[in-house]
């Protein structure tokens, strides 16, 4: 018996141990009954899985990609990139939405570029008087680089310091200029003061490494990689029934030990450790490679995805004739069987689907029994539609015993999990629980078992 690895980019690798079972159409005649757990949050950072990773970052609410909205204290209205970008910045909106949201490109803990709705950057009008604020630059430069200063007694009161050394001020609702010297006060009569609100934030590996910077980020991640998942975790997994792990890895791992900045080296060595821990037998532990995780429709077209999968498959086959190649179905509006034509022409390929009774308003008010019925009726029908005698292998690569039900009992969760185990157990390739460790208890298989 050995533990198999499936990995995906952000990919997953599947590490496995098992004797196998017959599967129609498989050229070997046998595959392990994959019963896996995801190792989420390990080699690809996800802040919601382990929020404490971000605790040491100064201004960790100003991470790269965070959306900020600025309300002038003097006129009581929000800054806005007029027309979504391409022209002036105004302060005439009573509410904030897309045009009033500025995405951070973090340079350091206090210095940023502001990206607007159409992808351009806020800067000073150097072609005019040099002090009016506009959103015209396709790429940020010196004149698009600003500092955010916060009131130490109220962090949501801020000033924005322009590259000319002066502060932005709202002179009128139609005129925002960088020509205020600032008097050090934070009162409601100061035209350079804004009330700050946050609209969406990202907490991934880019945000972590960019936030800590090149000196601290390697230390933080080295400690995380060496402690979050260890060899004893693999023993725990094996002892409790799962026979595989699905490991997310970032695309930048291919460049380790010299990944592009701000990523840091070391994740490849951690992955190598996983392969060593998975060898409880002489057989190679790499079981499958998943080429990408959760491509999103309609942004990712079926045509482009198909070309990517064919190219990725060809690359995998240059290195392995036996590893399964897993193709993730698109999230969003799409046909569940749209990859069948491609997969049926690719030897040892698998289609991955993810099922959560979450992330959609249809689940918001379901009771315990209604959630369980949904699994037995709707999810069962979905699995049956995909699992056909002449179709590709099907893998439920992510599911969880979590829902929108409040005050559910332990027995309720057990019934819900049992229903999913029964239904997803019919998938011809198997399933993987999300995830092994998570501060949100029911998302943690370790916590659920213990």
Image (cartoon, grey):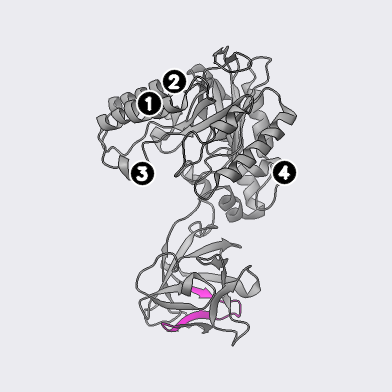
Q: Say which residue label 2 marks.
A: 426
The quarter of the rendered structure image containing the N terminus is top right
Question: Does label 4 or label 1 sit earlier along the sequence?
Answer: 4
Question: Does label 3 or label 2 sit earlier along the sequence?
Answer: 3
Q: What x and y, as percent, mark residue 152? A: 45, 68
Helix, strand or loop for disc 1? helix
> Splitting the image into 4 quarters, where does residue 130 fall?
bottom right
Q: Say which residue label 1 marks.
A: 380
Task: Report the front residue among 88 and 394.
Answer: 394
Helix, strand or loop for disc 3? loop
Q: Is residue 193 above or below residue 341?
A: below
Q: Is residue 222 visible?
A: no
Q: CA distance from mark 3 to mark 2?
A: 24 Å
How many residues crowd around disc 4 within 10 Å: few (fewer than 14), some, or many (20 or more)?
few
For residue 250, side relative to residue 168 (left or right): right
Magenta part of the chain: 159-174
Marks 4 and 3 close (CB-CB < 8 Å): no
Q: Is residue 28 above or below residue 417?
A: above
Q: Residue at x 55, y 20 (%)?
A: 235
Q: Is residue 16 visible?
A: yes
Q: Say which residue label 3 marks.
A: 360
Q: Say which residue label 4 marks.
A: 255
How many residues crowd around disc 3 within 10 Å: few (fewer than 14), some, or many (20 or more)?
few
Q: Is residue 444 above or below residue 206?
A: above
Q: What x and y, as percent, mark residue 145? A: 60, 71
Q: CA distance from mark 2 to mark 4?
A: 38 Å
């Amino acid at each position: 018996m050995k533990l198999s690895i499936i990995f995906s980019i952000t990919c997953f690798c599947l590490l496995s141990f098992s004797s196998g079972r017959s599967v129609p159409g498989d050229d070997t005649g046998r595959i392990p009954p994959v019963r896996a757990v995801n190792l989420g949050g390990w080699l690809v950072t996800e802040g919601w899985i382990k929020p404490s990773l971000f605790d040491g970052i100064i201004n960790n609410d100003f991470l790269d990609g965070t959306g900020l909205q600025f309300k002038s204290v003097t006129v009581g209205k929000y800054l806005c990139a007029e027309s979504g970008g391409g022209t002036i910045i105004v302060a005439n909106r009573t509410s904030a939405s897309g045009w009033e949201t500025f995405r951070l490109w973090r340079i350091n803990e206090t210095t940023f570029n502001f990206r607007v709705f159409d992808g351009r950057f806020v800067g000073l009008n150097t072609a005019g008087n040099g002090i009016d604020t506009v959103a015209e630059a396709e790429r940020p430069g010196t004149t698009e680089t600003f500092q955010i200063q916060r009131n130490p007694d109220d962090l949501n009161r801020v000033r924005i310091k322009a590259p000319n050394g002066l502060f932005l001020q709202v002179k009128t609702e139609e005129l925002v200029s960088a020509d205020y010297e600032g008097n050090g006060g934070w009162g409601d009569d100061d035209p350079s003061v804004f009330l700050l609100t946050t609209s969406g934030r990202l907490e991934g590996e880019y945000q972590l490494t960019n936030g800590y910077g090149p000196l601290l980020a390697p230390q933080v991640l080295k400690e995380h990689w060496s402690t979050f998942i260890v060899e004893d975790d693999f023993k725990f997994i094996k002892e409790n029934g799962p026979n595989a792990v699905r490991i997310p890895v970032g695309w930048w791992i291919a460049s380790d030990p010299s990944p592009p900045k701000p990523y840091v080296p070391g994740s490849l060595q951690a992955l190598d450790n996983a392969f060593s821990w998975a060898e409880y037998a002489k057989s190679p532990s790499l079981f499958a490679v998943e080429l990408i995780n959760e491509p999103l429709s309609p942004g990712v077209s079926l045509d482009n995805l198909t070309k990517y999968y064919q190219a990725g498959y060809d690359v995998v086959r240059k290195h392995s004739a036996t590893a399964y190649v897993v193709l993730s179905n698109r999230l969003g509006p799409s046909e569940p069987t749209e990859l069948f034509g491609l997969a049926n022409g690719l030897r040892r390929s698998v289609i991955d689907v993810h099922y959560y009774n979450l992330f959609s308003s249809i689940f918001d008010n379901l009771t315990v029994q209604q959630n369980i019925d949904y699994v037995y009726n709707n999810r069962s029908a979905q699995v049956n539609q995909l699992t056909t005698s002449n179709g590709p292998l099907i893998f439920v690569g992510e599911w969880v015993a979590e829902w929108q039900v409040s005050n559910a009992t332990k027995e309720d969760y057990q019934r819900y999990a049992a229903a999913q185990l029964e239904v997803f157990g019919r998938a011809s390739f198997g399933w993987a629980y999300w995830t092994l460790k998570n501060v949100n208890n029911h998302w943690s298989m370790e916590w659920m078992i213990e």
